[in-house]
Amino acid sequence: MNASISFSRKAKGAVLNLLMVLAAALICLLLLGLIGYILYRGIPHISWKFLSTKPSLLKGTTGILPNILNTIYIILITLIIVLPLGVGAAIYLNEYAKNKKLVSVIELATETLAGIPSIIYGLVGMLIFVQFFSLGTSLLAGALTLVIMTLPTIIRTAEESLKTVPASYREGALGLGAGKWHMIRTVVLPCVIDGIVTGCILSVGRVVGESAALLFTAGMANEMLNLIQAVKPGNAGSTLTVALYMYARERGQFDVAFAIAAILLILTFIINMSAKVAAVKLKKKRG
């Protein structure tokens, strides 16, 4: 009897392991197939002229330099604002907040915000930042809208990372005479760099891939702007995702759309690798 039960358990375990391996292999194949198809369709249409010029109907050129710059500006502005807010909120909720009911309400609110469709953020951003605060259709209005979108992701990932730090680390630092903020800054935060970087990468992925919210807030202009101009109200600009939508949906130029998609993949990979390298160096420096 025991032998038959043991054999049955082993058989079920083997089947479950096989199913998990097949599921993982299927996901990897889908990912590789998607990336490979986009690069196959897009890379042949990428050229230096395509990357270094702006589109012009008079000259008949199709360039995406303004879109690349606008995407970088949006990422920088969003991260500069959302990282201190998100990490600071996570530190308060995990280290300082005493009212557990309030913490539960805030956590529920952040989880709810994370599930709201981006088009709704775009409409709210248009009403609040574009109209109420008179920022106009601008990169700044788009970045502030994305701050609200990505804030729940940063808060939740940072908070969950803070919860993994053993209480003995805090007690040891406080026992040696360190103040609470000094303990958090020198002991706790270095231990959660990986979690913060993960939240940063997830936020960058959402920022880079967002188009619906930016159509209402950042606009579709293709003018060349510098970083100083990008943070001024009224300076609109289309990102790579907005340009991809316009070329694919409005103009039917799918070769250009696939080229932009390939550039988006490459740009996201570069940003993610840069964040990983920065996290490793910061961890070594702290250590």
Image (cartoon, rainbow, N blue to C red):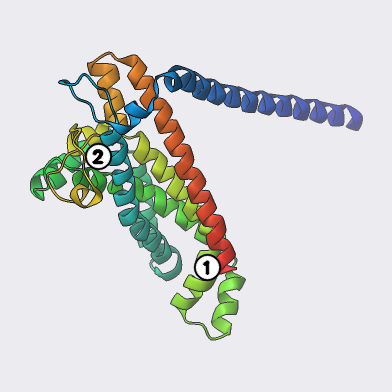
At 47% from the left and 77% from the top, the residue drawn is 182
Q: Callout 2 environment at 10 Å: few (<14), some (14 to 19), or many (20+)?
A: many
Disc 2 target residue = 121
At 29% from the left and 46% from the top, the residue drawn is 73
At 69% from the left and 27% from the top, the residue drawn is 21
Is the residue 164 above or below the residue 245 in the image?
A: below
Residue 273 vs residue 6, the one in the foreground = 273
> Picture coordinates of residue 115 (x, y %)?
36, 39
Disc 1 target residue = 188
Residue 269 vs residue 212, the one in the foreground = 269
Q: Callout 1 environment at 10 Å: few (<14), some (14 to 19), or many (20+)?
A: many
At 47% from the left and 71% from the top, the residue drawn is 185
Choose the circle earlier in sequence order: 1 or 2: 2
Residue 73 appears left or right of 24: left
Residue 79 appears left or right of 278: left
Residue 165 seen anywhere in this rendered image of the structure: no
Is the residue 71 above or below the residue 174 in the image?
A: above
Q: Amino acid at mark 2?
A: Tyr
Q: Quadrant of the C terminus?
A: bottom right
